[in-house]
Each structure stands twice: as structure tokens, then as C-alpha cells.
Amino acid sequence: MTKLTVLYGTETGNSELLAMDICKAGENSGLECEHYGMEVIEISEFCDIENLLIVCSTWGDGEQPDNAIELFEQVEGLNEGAIQSMKFSVLALGDTAFDLFCEAGKEWDRVLEEKGANRIHDRVDCDVDYEDDAEEWIENVISIFG
């Protein structure tokens, strides 16, 4: 059975709710799926993830949400190629009223690729009314893994 790990970075809870939705969809497609807040994952655990979906909100002026800062900084510090066996995709949440729309998700997408992970689906950037875009992304990424 394929194992899928969903990590979420959130301030208001939207990314966490989406992570739960992703796991429901994954389990309905026969995947073993777990979701975690980014604050509970150690970098050694992160490096062992094979199939990763990131759901991350942008906070403040283009910043990582509080629960994502430490893990993001640790991933940035990894050697190039450190996570080359990882497959990933990113769902970014933001608000087009801000200049740095979905910046946190864009940073995750960039750093994962830089460190050697393999993108299996393009990042999707979602505005405040994210439900339809998120649902389409979920269906697409689950179909790739499932």
C-alpha cells in the first residue's frame, strides 16, 4: 500500500482542514495517509518521507506560518540532493490582496526542488475562495498516487 504524508503549515486552520480532506480522499483511493502539522516533524523524519504533499498558508507579509518556520529553515539547510527519493506537490494558500501572494507555498515548492525532491504535480496557488482549486488539486494528486 502506498503511504502518503501530508504536512500543513497554518495560522488559521484552513491548511489543517485541507490536510484532513486530502487524507480522506487518499484513504478512499486505497492509500495509507497521515497528516501532521509541520511543527511536529523532525528533519530526520522529513528526509525519510517518500510521498509528500504540502499544504501551506502564507502569513503576514509573505512569511511562513509559525508552525512551519523551523522545519522550513531546516529543509533549507539540507544538502543538495538530500531528498532525491521524495515525490511531492504543494498547495499554497494566500490572498491576492497582498503583494507576496502564496509566497510561503512558493518557497516550499522551490526548496523541495532545490534539495532534489521530484515534483509530481505543479504547485497550485489558491486565493481566499480556495475550495474549488483545492478540490481539483486534491483529485489530481491523489489520482497520481492512487
Image (cartoon, rainbow, N blue to C red):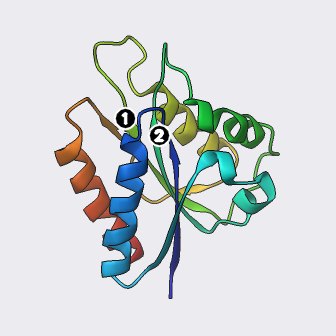
Percent x, y for residue 59?
48, 23
Q: Secondary structure at mark 1?
A: strand
Residue 47, quarter of picture? bottom right
Residue 36 pos. (x, y %):
56, 57
Q: For residue 14, which quarter of the picture?
A: top left
Residue 91 visible in the shown view: no
Res. 33 visible in picture: yes
Q: Residue at x 17, y 47 (%)?
A: 132
User: Would you say 29 lies left or right of 114 here?
Assistant: left
Local crowd size for mark 1, using a 10 Å CA cut-off: few (<14), some (14–19), many (≥20): many
Does label 1 or label 2 sit earlier along the sequence? 2
Q: Which residue is mark 2?
A: 56
The amino acid pointed to by label 1 is Leu
Query: Whole-Å distance between the Cαs marked 1 and 2?
Result: 6 Å
Residue 84, quarter of picture: bottom right
Q: Position of residue 39 (x, y in %)?
A: 66, 45
Q: Please state if 111 lies on the left or on the right of 31 as rendered.
A: right
Query: Where is residue 45 drawn, in percent x and y?
Result: 74, 62
* Amino acid of disc 2: Cys
Above-or-below relation of 85 to 98: below
Return the residue at label 1. 93
Where 96 sits versus 114, above or below? above
Q: Quadrant of the C terminus?
A: bottom left
Q: Are marks 1 and 2 in contact (CB under 8 Å)?
A: yes
Viewer-closest of 4 and 68: 68
Q: Classify mark 2: helix, strand or loop.
A: strand
Q: Return the residue found at the far bottom.
A: 1
